[in-house]
Image (cartoon, helix red, strand yellow):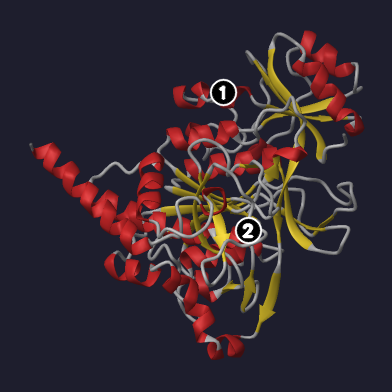
Amino acid sequence: MNYPTTGRVLVKPCECGCHAPAHLDVVSGAARPVGTVDGAGIDSTIHRSASAMRVRRVFNAAATLALPGQRGEGFDPVEREAGLDRVLALEISSPARAHQLALELGARDDIEWAMAEPLSHAPLGAIQLARQAMRVDALALRHPFEQTRLFEALELEPGDSRVRVGVVDTGVALEHEEFRQRIFRGVDTVDLGHGDMGSGVELLGDSAGPDAFAHDETGHGTHVAGLIAANGRHIPRGAGGSATLIVARALAAARSAEGQIMGIGGTIDIDAAVKAAVDLGARVLNLSFGTSEFDLPEEAPPVHTESLHYALARGVIPVAAMGNSGREERYFPASLDGVIAVAAVDAESRPSGFSTRGAHCAIAAPGENIISVGLSGYRTSTGTSHASPLVAGAVALMCARADRAGYPLTAARARTILRASARQLDAPAEAVGAGLLDARRALEQLDAEIQSYEEASHG
């Protein structure tokens, strides 16, 4: 089967003495890839399939994040335990042989895993709206927040600017009035090259080369970010209240064979963005993209395992969209352990027909005809991509409240509280998880846990 791939190969040796630079340094122009992995057996296997290669590390080290050209050095014990220092990306002279090379490398005893780099997608199903039209339809503007009791939650907990939400997506419309003073930092990790990606997918705009700003070219990331942290000029204030954003642009703009505009990203671009967002201080991650298990070879490990393992080890709470396939399947990163997977429901709290199903589904939120920020003005969009940020915003409120009380809110505890406080729906758990997000009740349950924690601490 021909799985969609960038033509790069990801490989994780059991041991790695390679001196390759980090992806962040390569994409920023601070370093160049090297031409060898080990100077021995691994290189020999590669050269049977490709006459030349360029090698980079997928991940940066936290300690050297602020040191351009040195970000592939100085990994700490947490990073090494997650194996981040050993994950390499190979650009080979024969991209068509990526799958075969991955099989040959994976068969070696000194390789933990290898795979042709798969692609992740963020579909865009949006209709541009005029500002005047939105003012007329005030009910549509407010309904998702009323449906999930987010307005009531924001009255109880306004949030905290020190809580940073990492939006790993297509970037953000940085100059939009809704994001004024709401963005803490940004990073751009996109490095896909130019032109045709295969299967009729064509890259558009900024898809390669050094980047300093995480500008959005599709509107997907902008819409997502607005649901979390909009200022509330002409739409409801973001669900995260006073939370600020770390914008990590990891998906480029592309046009499908059917003419649909979407975000598309390679695994290394996304993993590098997740890692950078965590190292920049993200407390919550919103991940409104994914790769289906059916787009991965059977021998390939789940994508984004290392980066999400690291995020969880650093105390970050990841929230991800279930996917829009309408079938039961694993969609990564939503189906990874520790991730809060969010399904979509309609305005009547019925499961959306497009929402991916699965036993890993944690909770549901509105995901149909959701109004948020556009590249200019505002627009509606539909998909689990737009249900996820409502939950991520609620989690940011929970973090603000927990941090103020000195309560250690972990991803596991946040997931438990969200599920226990959710409004039960007449729908199977694989479609809606524990039910519909109830942000106010989640804060009230958190308050009860904080009180018990304080009593135990002083007892």
The x and y percentages for residue 23 are: 67, 36
- Kindly state the secondary structure of the residue where label 1 is placed: loop
Q: Quadrant of the C terminus?
A: top left
Q: Is residue 352 above or below residue 348?
A: above
User: Is residue 272 visible to the viewer in this orientation of the structure?
Assistant: yes
Q: Please name the residue shown 65% across and 63% down the image.
A: 220
Q: Residue 83: which disc?
A: 1
- Near-viewer residue (238 or 29): 238
Question: In the visual, does 127 lie left or right of 434?
Answer: right
Identity of the residue drawn at 25% across and 44% down: 407
Q: Amino acid at mark 1?
A: Gly
Q: Position of residue 212 (x, y in %)?
A: 63, 53
Q: Residue furthest front?
A: 426
Residue 131 x, y percent position in the rendering: 59, 86
Separation of residues labelled 1 and 2 (CA atoms): 28 Å
Q: Nearer the viewer, residue 49 or 439?
A: 439
Is residue 299 positioned above or below 142 on the image?
Answer: above
Q: Is residue 79 left or right of residue 149?
A: right
Q: State which quarter of the image contains the N terminus.
A: top right
Question: Does the residue at mark 1 contact the one at mark 2 (Cβ under 8 Å)?
Answer: no
Instruction: Decide: is 43 above or below 326.
Output: above
**Residue at (39, 62) in percent of width and height:** 438
Q: Secondary structure at mark 2?
A: loop
Q: Is residue 186 visible?
A: no
Q: Amino acid at mark 2?
A: Gly
Q: Which residue is mark 2?
A: 171
- Nearer-the-camera pick, 263 or 65: 263
